[in-house]
Each structure stands twice: as C-alpha cells, then as structure tokens.
C-alpha cells in the first residue's frame, strides 16, 4: 500500500507536562494532584522509587536536548501540555514568571527548529491547592480554568497555532473521580457529577476565549475513543456495548459538539445527575476546529449484573501490548469514520502508540513490535484519507518513555528510550522508522533532499523482524 500522505499532513509526537518534566523545580512552581497521589501510593519496585523521586525524564532540565531530538526525527509538530501549577502555583492567584518563561523558551526553540507546537492546556495535573478547594466539583472551577488559560494564551497565542483545552476528560473523570485509580483518587458519582458539568462549561468558555486571539489557527479537544465490540451477538451484550459506547465515546463529545447531554448521564450519576439551565445548555455545542482522537485499542464488552452500568470488559482475543491492550489497527479506521460521521469535524490522531518492554542491547533498542504497531496504524490513517475523512495529522504517543500514571515508570511508550537513573536518551528503531516515513513523505520543495535520496518503501525491509508474524495489515 502506498504510504504517501497529502503534502500538508502533519506527523508529530506527543507528551504531557506531568509525565516528562520532573517535579523538582526550584522556580516557585506549585504541586499538582498527581504529585500527592504518587507520594501516597505504596512503594514496590525500584521503578516506583524513581517514580517517587518525581524526576521522570527531567525534561525541565533537558528540554533543549529533547527539541534537538524532535528535530533529528524530522517531526513536523510537537504536542505538549502546560503545567497549570507551574504557571499559577496556587491555581488561581499570582503568576509564576519563571514557569511561564519555560514554555516561552520551549515554543521559541521549537519554532527555530521548524516544529509546529500543539499545546494542551489540561493534561490531568490540577494544582493541589485547587483540589483542596473542591477541585473540578467547585462551581468556580470554570473561572479558575479561564484565568489560567488566559495567562497562557496572552503569552503564547502569537506563536502556537494549535490548541487543545482538555485531554481525555472521560479518563480523568472516570478513573480519577468514580474509580479512584487516578488522582485525585475519589470514588464518588456525586463528586463526578458536579465535576462533569464544570468541565463541560470550562471547555466551552475557554474555547470562546481562545477564539478572541486572532493568531490561534485551530482549537480542539483530545478525546479517548475505542470502538466497543459486543463480546457476543446476544441482545444483552449488544445493549451493554451501546451503553459503554455512550459513556466512553460520547459522554463529552456529544455536549461539546452537538450541545446535547447524553441520556446515559442518568445511569452514571443517578440522583446526582446535574441540572442544566437553558443558558448553560446554550453555552455548549460550540464549533470545534478539530477533534483529536487518542486511539490505543478497542474494547470487547459484555453485560454483567454487578458492574458499573452493568458492563464488563472481556479479555483481548488477539496479541496485546505491554499494557494488556488488544492490538487492533482496524479499530483506528473505525474510530475515525465514526467520529467524522457523528460530528462532521476535521480530525487529528492526537495520540497513538504502544508500550513494550524494551531492552537496550549493544546501545540499540530493536523495538520491532512497536514499529509494526505504528506502521499498521499509520496505514489505517492513509485508508481514512482515501475514504475522504478529513484527517489532518497523526501524533505518536510518545516522544519519550515517561511516567505512565498509575503504572509508574514501568510502561515504555517512547520513540526514544529514557534511562530514568542517568536521563540518557537513546532513539529506538521505531524512532528511525518514523523518521524515514516522514522523510519519505516530505514534499521535494521543503524536504532535505539528501535524506530522501534512496528512500522508498524498501526501507521497511530493515524492520523484517517486526513482520515475523506475517505482513503488516494492508500491504
Ligand atoms: C492516554 C493519556 C496519555 C498516556 C497514554 C498511554 O490515555 O492521554 O497521557 O498515558 O494514554
């Protein structure tokens, strides 16, 4: 299959502030809910000890090196997030100029390397002080978010064209406030219900604010999407998979894009389901310039009497990544088609990637399983474009191995390996694969001709080991 993408298609990689920066700033930054979540978790392996030190990739010290690596990989764009507490330590008060300066310099440096910044305002690291004040369940939280967003936009709107308000709101609401597995570790549908309403309003008000900056080109959100496949054709399993689809895939997108609150909120929040005034409802449904899709896997769903929403997830039936997530490239195409049919909005894949247990041997990381995963998913993006889906770009999760939330430092997603003791970075074979793919796709006018010379589909021969289980789908 031809892997030449349209000329202006963006190839990038993504990270988030909390997962890479390291929380060892002496610049007056405030702590986040994830900092306190880590400190209260039980210590086990050595990785956990490194996680507790909260240094992670020490990107706040090594950021220039990381931008050079982005450039070495020939990426068109870099998706990163801003840490709210670094910019406003208490979350809703004085600005920390040193924190702001970090992002100011990062953006300048990216632009100097010809890399387009895509900025996420909220990737889960709420300032701890705000959590002490009720967090997202506090009705003032949309104002807090607006003030923070304005502070960042005043500084960066002139240089950052692509903005995302929230990353995966469903994940941080469900795992953080209903299941208690993510920070802030709350298990309360009542709390989550209040937060749901405030998060919805926060996005809409902030998107309106961002629209007032003329230089911002596109405003969107990044949403987790997984096709929900019934585990069997039984009516109960089919109904369960529809419930999961409504909850997992539509819960935030329906209100934000179509202005409607999904019926499933009744079952999720019960008697706590929030009331909406007409004027509040009118605030929702503002047009997005794009929907960012974070796709990793699909889900096999069955009915189960005793689980939340009477839904349970069946174990994967095919190969999985180190997260135990089923590898299903076709699911990405399905998610792209579904999102465009539902919401008629341009799309980016804002995250896609795989964790594998990488090992360095003779200074090299031969992560052919990841090469294969990426290649098979990128082919699905090409198919989507051929079916006239307006897909504008693809971002690998992640640029660097990093802190993977409640899995600590044990799950490696990077194109670049990070040694969490020495902070050494080593480009993996998947990084080189991606660089070749990008070089191959560059238009002759803008490309570095030398690196393109001799590049054709044969470069995949170098990754033979990745294909021991057959040809990648779609070739
Ligand atoms: C997504 C998150 C991202 C990362 C990947 C593996 O849900 O947005 O931060 O953890 O999963």
Image: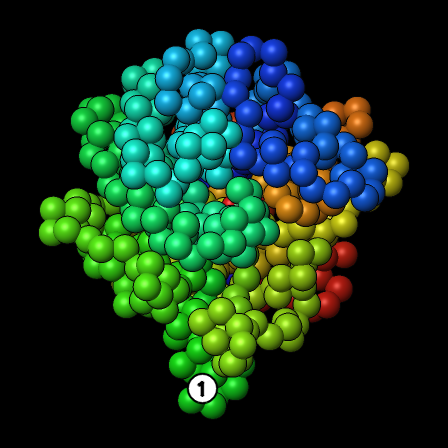
Residue 120 position (above or below residue 263): above
Query: Where does the image place residue 85, in percent across and percent down from the top left?
Result: 48, 23
Nearest the viewer among 133 and 39 is: 133
Residue 461 position (above or below residue 49): below
- Picture residue at 34% right of the left edge, 15% below the top: 155
Tag 1 secondary structure: helix
Nearest the viewer among 288 and 18 is: 18
- Picture residue at 71% right of the left edge, 61% below the top: 467
Q: Is residue 299 left or right of residue 406?
A: left
Q: Is residue 80 left or right of residue 362?
A: left
Please indicate, yes or no, whether residue 474 appears anywhere in the rendered image.
no
Query: Where does the image place residue 41, in percent across and percent down from the top left?
Result: 69, 42
Query: Where does the image place residue 321, in percent across and percent down from the top left?
Result: 67, 58
- Picture residue at 61% right of the left edge, 38% below the top: 37
Instruction: Identify the residue at the far right of this view.
Output: 362
Reading the image, the residue beneath label 1 is 236
Quarter holding the C terminus is bottom right
- Picture residue at 49% right of the left edge, 74% below the top: 311
Nearest the viewer among 118 and 61 is: 61
* Neighbour tally class for label 1: few under 14, some 14-19, many 20 plus, Cα within 10 Å: some
């Amino acid at each position: 299959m031809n892997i030449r993408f349209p000329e202006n298609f963006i190839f990038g990689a993504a990270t988030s502030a909390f997962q890479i920066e390291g929380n060892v700033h002496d610049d007056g930054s405030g702590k986040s809910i994830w900092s306190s979540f880590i400190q209260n978790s039980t210590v086990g392996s050595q990785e956990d000890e490194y996680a507790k030190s909260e240094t992670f990739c020490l990107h706040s010290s090594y950021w220039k090196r990381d931008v050079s690596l982005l450039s070495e990989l020939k990426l068109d764009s870099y998706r990163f997030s801003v840490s709210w507490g670094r910019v406003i330590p208490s979350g809703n008060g004085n600005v920390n100029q040193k924190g702001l300066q970090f992002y100011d310099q990062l953006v300048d440096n990216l632009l100097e390397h010809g890399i387009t910044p895509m900025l996420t305002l909220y990737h889960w690291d709420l300032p701890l002080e705000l959590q002490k004040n009720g967090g997202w369940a506090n009705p003032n939280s949309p104002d807090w978010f607006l003030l923070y967003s304005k502070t960042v936009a005043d500084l960066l709107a002139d240089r950052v064209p692509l903005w995302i308000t929230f990353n995966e709101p469903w994940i941080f609401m469900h795992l953080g406030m209903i299941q208690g597995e993510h920070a802030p570790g709350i298990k309360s549908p009542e709390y989550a219900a209040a937060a749901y309403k405030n998060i919805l309003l926060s996005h809409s008000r902030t998107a309106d604010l961002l629209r007032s900056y003329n230089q911002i080109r596109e405003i969107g959100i990044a949403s987790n999407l997984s096709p929900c496949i019934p585990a069997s054709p039984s009516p109960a399993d089919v109904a369960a998979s529809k419930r999961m689809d409504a909850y997992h895939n539509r819960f935030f997108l329906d209100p934000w894009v179509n202005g409607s609150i999904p019926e499933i909120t009744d079952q999720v929040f019960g008697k706590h389901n929030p009331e909406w005034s007409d004027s509040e409802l009118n605030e929702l449904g503002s047009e997005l310039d794009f929907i960012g899709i974070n796709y990793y896997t699909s889900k096999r769903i069955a009915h189960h009497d005793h689980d939340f929403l009477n839904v349970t997830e069946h174990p994967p039936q095919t190969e999985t990544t180190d997260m135990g997530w089923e590898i299903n490239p076709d699911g990405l195409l399905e998610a792209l088609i579904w999102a465009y049919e539902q919401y008629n909005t341009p799309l980016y894949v804002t995250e896609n990637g795989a964790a594998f247990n990488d090992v360095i041997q003779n200074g090299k990381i031969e992560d052919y399983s990841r090469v294969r995963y990426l290649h098979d998913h990128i082919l699905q993006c090409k198919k989507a474009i051929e079916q006239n889906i307006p897909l504008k770009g693809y971002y690998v999760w992640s640029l660097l191995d990093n802190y993977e939330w409640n899995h600590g430092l044990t799950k490696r997603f990077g194109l670049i390996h990070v040694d969490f003791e020495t902070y050494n970075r080593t480009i993996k074979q998947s990084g080189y694969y991606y660089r070749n793919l990008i070089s191959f796709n560059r238009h002759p006018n803008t490309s570095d001709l030398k690196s393109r010379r001799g590049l054709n589909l044969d470069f995949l021969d170098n990754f033979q080991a990745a294909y021991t289980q057959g040809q990648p789908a779609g070739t």
